[in-house]
Image: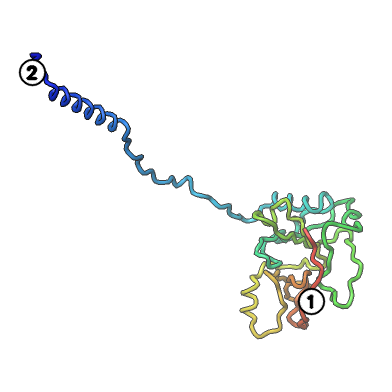
Amino acid sequence: MPKHLFTPRIFTALVLSFGAVSCSHTKTTLVEAPPAYQPPSSDAKLKLPTLGSAKLPEVQDAVRRIFKDSALVDLNSQPTFFTGDFNGDDSQDLAVVVKPAAGKLADLNEEYPSWLLRDPTIDTDTRRPALNVTDQETLLAIIHGFGDNNWRDPQATQTFLLKNVVGSNMSVVNGKEFSANNSGKKLPQAKGDLIGEDLHGTTGYLYFSSANYSWYDPKTFKPKAPTTGMFHSR
């Protein structure tokens, strides 16, 4: 370009043009496209644990947790075990038929056991005799559930060991359905599910109330005023 044509006005225009191009280039390199939306994977959803039906190995583990090697699951009883919410605390409990292990009777009769030995057929309002487990006796152990894993939880140690209540045709009876189906009758104040069975020639129910298990015979039952009692702590 001839020198006489390169005027100050042209120089200024060139500078402004160069600056505009530089700014435009800088802004372009700084702008990033927003990330594309990624739908959550179905595998990432929270999966809550589900409680399956009780299996014999885990039932045996629960019995060992409570009784160590002093009691065994009685495999000759049918059914051998069943589950339900027997004390009405919205936690699944385990009821299992057990018998003393050979040579371990003294352990089941120790002075301060970690379970409660009870006879639901005895009226404890008038007396509570000293109880002992006898050799070859068949008993019903009810392990109350605790925490998210219910009766399977290692801290589930609250247990009742019940005498004289292992009968035939044992089954779990829903507490609410039991009350609804027997409306108008004299019924016990059961806290949760009941265990129906044939015992000593009578069809009755084992139930939990007032911090203890009792036997309900529809023919001889007399309602009792609710009482409070000491509850076996975990």
Say what amino acid the circle numbered 1 marks.
Answer: Thr
Labelled disc at residue 5: 2
Residue 86, labelled with which disc? none
Instruction: State the count of labels.
Output: 2
Q: Percent position (x, y) of residue 46?
A: 52, 50
* Crowd band around label 2 with a 10 angstrom C-alpha radius: few (<14), some (14–19), many (20+): few
Query: For residue 151, what is the image quadrant?
Result: bottom right
Within the image, what quadrant is residue 129 found in?
bottom right
Residue at 16%, 22% in the rendered image: 11
Q: Residue at x 34, y 41 (%)?
A: 36
Residue 198, image x and y in percent?
74, 72
**Figure coloring:** rainbow
Res. 227 mark: 1
Q: Nearer the viewer, mark 1 or mark 2?
A: 2
Q: Earlier in the sequence, mark 1 or mark 2?
A: 2
The quarter in which the N terminus is drawn is top left
Q: Residue at x 17, y 25 (%)?
A: 12
Instruction: Please tell me which residue lies in front, 59 or 33.
Output: 33
Q: Please provide percent x and percent y for residue 15.
A: 20, 24
Position of residue 47 in the picture relative to residue 30 (left or right) = right
Q: Is residue 5 left or right of residue 109?
A: left
Rendering quarter of residue 219: bottom right
**What is the spatial separation of the Cα atoms under label 1 and label 2, in whole angstroms?**
114 Å
Q: Circle 2 — which element?
A: helix
Q: Residues within 10 Å of mark 1 (few under 14, many from 20)?
A: few
Give the position of the C terminus as an image quadrant.
bottom right
Does 36 appear above or below 80?
above
Residue shown at 25% from the left, 27% from the top: 22
Circle 1: element type:
loop
| Amino acid type assigned to the residue bearing label 2 in the image | Leu
Q: Nearer the viewer, residue 72 or 213?
A: 213
Q: Residue furthest top?
A: 2
